[in-house]
Image (spheres, rainbow, N blue to C red):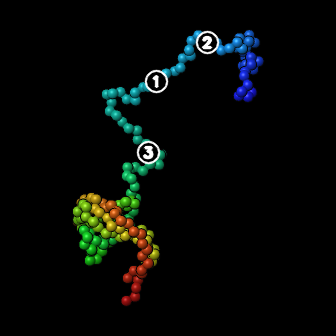
């Protein structure tokens, strides 16, 4: 049956008697009573006396990171050198280890107390090659966002946000492998 062809009484539902089929050919008949459409029934989730609760969905079920950061942090222990603090270069760069890192910042422990807002120069080694040849290094200018006392006495937790990031390769042979 095509979409443009009208239904004739002979093409009606096979269970209908022929008399009903002839009556249907006269035209549409008005319904005596409108069919009842089930209404939308909204029941409150909680009674007004109960506190509002939120459904907790495990993150592995939906693939969402548990933190609400723009760029989530990765817990990586990478070598880090503090080259300058407050615009004053260090006599010998302090070698430290990161606690976590993201594309916009880093958190590390430092034996020096740094004030929030201080500018620092960091060098983070992302990829270490044997003998130190071909290390991938991030040289960055950053500012201290937060400084807090750490669990270890004499150490401070430093959260820094990157201002300027530059990737570099360190192809020099470390001095410990050179013959005197």
Gap in angstroms between the C-alphas marked 1 and 2: 29 Å
Residue at the location (44% across, 78% down)?
171
Q: Residues within 10 Å of mark 2 (few under 14, many from 20)?
A: few
41 or 121: which is nearer to us?
Answer: 121
| Residue 44 horizontal/vertical position (percent) | 40, 27
Question: In screen coordinates, is 145 left or right of 33?
Answer: left
Gap in angstroms between the C-alphas marked 3 and 1: 30 Å
| Residue 130 horizontal/vertical position (percent) | 46, 76
Label placed on residue 58: 3
Residue at the location (32% across, 64% down)?
142
Q: Residues within 10 Å of mark 1 (few under 14, many from 20)?
A: few
Ranked by sequence position, the earlier of labels 1 and 2 is 2
The relative height of residue 48 versus residue 156 in the rendered view (above or below) is above
Furthest residue to the bottom?
180
| Residue 43 horizontal/vertical position (percent) | 42, 25
Residue at the location (40% across, 71% down)?
137
Do residues under tags 3 and 1 come within 8 Å of each other at their CB atoms? no
The relative height of residue 3 versus residue 109 in the rendered view (above or below) is above
Label placed on residue 30: 2
Answer whether residue 97 is visible to the viewer in this image: no
Q: Nearer the viewer, mark 1 or mark 2?
A: 2
38 or 23: which is nearer to us?
Answer: 23
Q: Secondary structure at mark 3?
A: loop
**Residue that label 1 marks:** 41
Residue at the location (74% across, 17% down)?
9
Question: Which part of the image, by quadrant, shows the C terminus?
Answer: bottom left
């Amino acid at each position: 049956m095509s979409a443009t062809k009208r239904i004739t009484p002979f093409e009606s539902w096979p269970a209908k008697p022929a008399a009903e089929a002839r009556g249907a050919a006269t035209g549409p008949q008005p319904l005596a009573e409108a069919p009842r459409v089930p209404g939308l029934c909204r029941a409150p989730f909680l009674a007004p006396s109960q506190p509002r609760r939120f459904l907790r969905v495990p993150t592995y079920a939906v693939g969402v990171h548990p933190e609400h950061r723009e760029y989530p942090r990765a817990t990586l222990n990478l070598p880090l050198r503090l080259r300058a603090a407050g615009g004053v270069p260090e006599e010998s760069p302090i070698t430290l280890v990161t606690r976590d890192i993201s594309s916009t910042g880093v958190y590390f422990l430092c034996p020096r107390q740094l004030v929030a807002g201080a500018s620092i120069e960091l060098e983070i080694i992302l990829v270490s090659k044997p003998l130190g040849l071909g290390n991938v290094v991030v040289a960055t200018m950053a500012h201290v966002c937060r400084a807090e006392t750490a669990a270890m006495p004499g150490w401070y937790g430093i959260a820094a946000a990157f201002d300027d990031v530059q990737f570099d390769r360190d192809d020099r042979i470390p001095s410990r492998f050179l013959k005197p």
